[in-house]
Amino acid sequence: MMKLIHAPNDWLEKTVKPFNFDEHDAPSIEKEMVEIMDKERGIGLSANQVELDAQIFVIKPTDLKGYEDNKGFAIINPKITHVSQETIIGEEGCLSFPFLYIKVKRPYGLVVDCLDIAGKECTIELTGWNARIFGHEYDHLYGINFIDRVSKLRLEMARKKRSKYIKKYDQLHKRRVI
């Protein structure tokens, strides 16, 4: 049974092995990872985040041709074949780094070759938000976290903001017992 891990954890810095269909049951893994992602209210989840040594992640795209909105699916052994020159900066968070949000620069568009849960080869073109989700999860497979994509100063500012939020949240939700 898989469980979501949080930083710090060595799994989050590990490069995982290519997915092996003889060793792993892709449909079951997809189902379990989507359930965890949905339970945690995420839009992506990589193998590293559930301590699985295999190149697989799930994403929940929006407005992606050929895919149902808000239905997560697995991407297996992905290879990026084209990256747009255009980049965009956007705020990201990560289920393994709760309440930490940082603006990260990513390519606006990607073309990707991958396998689906049946082992069928697929080519997917992603733009905007979907390209950002893919890039974030793809990085995880190589032990790269979104905090690695920003300066130490930006990271420290985001951590201070998170600390203030958590402190305020804790104060608001304290209850007196009489």
Image (spheres, rainbow, N blue to C red):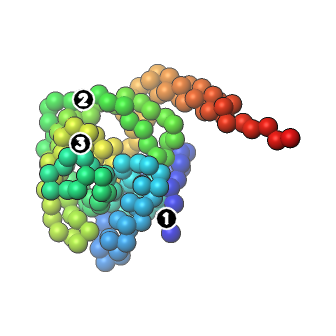
Q: Report the amino acid beneath label 3.
A: Ala
> Which mark is drawn over residue 169?
none
Q: Secondary structure at mark 1?
A: loop
Alpha carbon separation for disc pair 2 and 1: 33 Å
Residue at image x 36%, y 50%?
A: 44
Question: Residue pushed farthest right?
Answer: 178
> Which mark is drawn over residue 2?
1
Answer with mark 1 or mark 3, whichever residue precedes in sequence. 1
Q: Residues within 10 Å of mark 2 (few under 14, many from 20)?
A: some
Q: Report the amino acid beneath label 2.
A: Ile
Q: Secondary structure at mark 2?
A: strand
Residue at image x 31%, y 66%?
A: 19
Alpha carbon separation for disc pair 1 and 3: 26 Å
Residue at image x 14%, y 36%?
A: 84
Do tag 2 and tag 3 residues touch (Cβ < 8 Å)? no
Can see residue 17?
no
Give the quarter of the image for residue 130.
top left
Question: Residue pushed farthest bottom?
Answer: 22
Asked if residue 89 is positioned above or below residue 126 in the image, the reply reads above
Give the quarter of the image for residue 8.
top right
Can see residue 141?
yes
Left/right placement of residue 93 relative to residue 165 reads left
Residue beneath label 3, please?
131
Q: Secondary structure at mark 3?
A: helix
Give the quarter of the image for residue 58.
bottom left
Residue beneath label 2, please?
88
Answer with mark 2 or mark 3, whichever residue precedes in sequence. 2
Q: Position of residue 157 (x, y in %)?
A: 50, 23
In the rendered image, which quarter contains the C terminus?
A: top right
Do tag 2 and tag 1 residues touch (Cβ < 8 Å)? no
Left/right placement of residue 38 relative to residue 66 reads right
Q: Position of residue 176 (x, y in %)?
A: 79, 37
